[in-house]
Image (spheres, grey):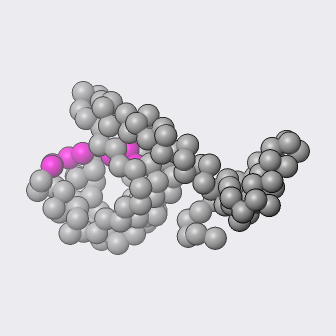
Amino acid sequence: MMQDSKRVFMTLSATELAQIDLLIDQGIVHSRTEFIQRAIKEELKANRAIIQTVNAETFHGRTLETLVGNYTYTDEDINDRLRRKGASQLFIVGRLDLSQIRQEDNLFRAIKSLTVVGKLVASPTIQAHYED
């Protein structure tokens, strides 16, 4: 299983399973899992514009920066972000790793608000700061 993946259980009708199994028998896909993974990827790709429209939203009069994917920030990244952008408000869809951050004060100045839909990897201090 992929790192940071989540197990999802779902219920399909007997007809849906039979159709998937027919595609497996015909060599279109190798397994039920592969079929479901392909279907999810295609649906996410088809709806990419909807997912990315959050970029256009504003939060308290300031632009909310949205990132989709897996991101890891170091102290160097945060210091660079402070120089280039000043304070930001981040909305992450995916995974954000802040475990390498040692200069927490700089992080808190650079990223004023943080919302992660997915997984946040960070020290308890950082997690508590952004939960408030």
Q: Position of 19 compared to 87: left or right?
A: right
Which image quarter is the N terminus in? bottom right
Q: Position of residue 65 (x, y in %)?
A: 29, 43
Q: Residue at x 41, y 60 (%)?
A: 70
- Magenta: main secondary structure: strand
In the displayed structure, would residue 72 be above or below residue 88?
below
Taking the view exactly as shown, the residue that stands out farthest to the top is 61
Q: Magenta region: which residues?
A: 85-92
In the displayed structure, would residue 20 be above or below residue 75?
above
Residue in the foreground of this view, choosing between 52 and 123: 52
Q: Residue at x 35, y 49 (%)?
A: 67
Q: Position of 33 compared to 76: left or right?
A: right
Quarter-wise, where is residue 61 in the image?
top left
Residue in the foreground of this view, choosing between 52 and 102: 52
Which image quarter is the C terminus in? top left
Q: Position of residue 68 (x, y in %)?
A: 40, 50
Taking the view exactly as shown, the residue that stands out farthest to the right is 14
In the displayed structure, would residue 74 be above or below residue 82?
below
Q: Residue at x 16, y 55 (%)?
A: 82
Q: Residue at x 48, y 45 (%)?
A: 45
- Specify whether residue 88 is painted magenta: yes
Can residue 117 be seen from the camera position used here?
yes
